[in-house]
Amino acid sequence: MFDAVVVGAGPNGLTAAVELARRGFSVALFEAKETVGGGARTEELTLPGFLHDPCSAAHPLGINSPAFRALPLERYGLEWLHSDLPMAHPFPDGSAAVLARSVAETAASFGPRDAGAYRRLVEPFLPHWDTLVRDFMSLPLTALPRDPVTLARFGLAGLPPSTWLTRRFRDEPAKTVFAGLVAHVMAPLSGLATGAIGLVFALAAHARGWPVARGGSQAISDALAGYLKDLGGEIHTDYEVKRLDDLPPARAYVFDTSPTALARIAGFGGYYDNYRYGAGVFKVDYALDGPVPWTAEEPRSATTVQIGADSAEIGAALRAASRENRAPDRPFMITVQPSVVDPTRAPEGKQVFWAYGHVPSGWTGDLTDPIERQLERFAPGFRDRVLARATFGPPQLAVRNANYVGGDIGTGAFSGLQTLLRPKLSLSPYTTPHPAIFICSSATPPGPGVHGMSGHNAAKAVWRKLRSTR
């Protein structure tokens, strides 16, 4: 009998398995796909020699993750690569704002009227960042806050909607960049705690950047898997779990799955029926015959580029996908160009490029043309660089990763109390109706992203249970 069996080898499942194995528990991990990875994979999606990330590509939360930073992942091949700028946001007039490692450089890109306001917003938190990010990503109650005063100040700034926070800015560049940061979790700008989401992404850039992993996001998953094997953990791939009887006996079961999938497998009936999934995404991976021809200079040296003309356009795109049940005419897009810093991702002189826009849950249309029309606004001649493309709408994304219900790459809507208390209104979000079954996916706090903290937090609940019953 194993001490723990983990189902799902995404970053959270892998991290949960590693944390348990590190503490001497016997662990076996089961993954439905042929390789580990979940939202952190790398594949040849277009042409031979072009290595694409089917989901997450840039990792501001990964390099800042307290869980990952405590593990020797570099010994297992993980190398973070940084571009000159973590993120750039071009505008239709050919200018751009940036999110740089330097607060001063970032503030200057917003213009003189907002530079001081931005510095006053972020500078009080940066000296306390390591403690703050640990406290923020360990909530609720998986660990006592190390710096409750800073955490409380962060809550006062971040719990209101982002539209409240951005009132301190007078001009559009700062408002637009911040709106784009919030949109990384597909949350309407007026939602609860969206200010905190934007702040976390900004502070992460200033603290350690928004890097990509050399060779692709698969390197993160492979490093976790390699460490787990050295700790004595077992990994079984190409093994789909449809019911608990498919698994070997264990003292605890940990699921890196959506809540509805867990309910189906474990026989929990309607326990998670009130859990809500959010808008989906439409994603295009490109093989390019050279760099993206950005009009502005700044995006040419940034790994991540946000695309949205202004905060109103971004807000309209989010409302269309999440509330109006239609695809936006001008989608807000997050794009990543790993080849800016990683020449291993494509043949010499070529590049890989990644872009997605928001669409309604389960949407079956084709957003390729609106995406490319948006790109042409900021990079005229983009289409001329395209050698091949691979498109994935919500149905295709859900097939590739069962956690992406309706194409929701966050495994749950960021709206209302579910932003903070997910998947149930509970101070023990990793436990379930069965005392030996736990959930550790992005449906649990702190939510989506390749950071492993949901797995780390869930593992704490598991090992406390195992120790109490040993």
Image: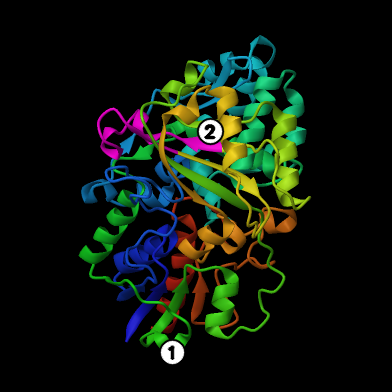
Q: Is residue 340 visible?
A: yes
The label shown at residue 210 is none
Name the front one of labels 1 and 2.
1
Q: Position of residue 436 (x, y in %)?
A: 49, 82
Q: Quadrant of the N terminus?
A: bottom left
Q: Secondary structure at mark 2?
A: helix
- The residue beneath circle 1 is 245
Q: Amino acid at mark 1?
A: Asp
Q: Amino acid at mark 2?
A: Leu
The answer to whether residue 80 is above or below residue 120 is below
Highlighted magenta segment, given as a residue range: 334-353
Instruction: Say whether residue 443 is left or right of residue 324.
Output: left
Q: Secondary structure at mark 1?
A: helix
Quarter of the view holding residue 8:
bottom left
Instruction: Say whether residue 48 is left or right of residue 436.
Output: left
Q: Is residue 346 magenta?
A: yes
Give the mark nearest the N terminus, 1 or 2: 2
Q: Is residue 149 visible?
A: no
Question: Which residue is drawn at the image coordinates 69% and 26% (left, top)?
Answer: 310
- The residue beneath circle 2 is 203
Q: Position of residue 247 (x, y in %)?
A: 39, 84
Question: Which residue is drawn at the image coordinates 75% and 53% (left, top)?
Answer: 325
Q: CA distance from mark 1 to mark 2?
A: 45 Å
Q: Position of residue 33 (x, y in %)?
A: 37, 68
Instruction: Say whether residue 230 is left or right of residue 414.
Output: left
The colouring scheme, among rainbow, by chain, secondary structure or one colour, is: rainbow
Quarter of the view holding residue 272:
bottom right
Q: Residue furthest top?
A: 112
Q: Quadrant of the C terminus?
A: bottom left
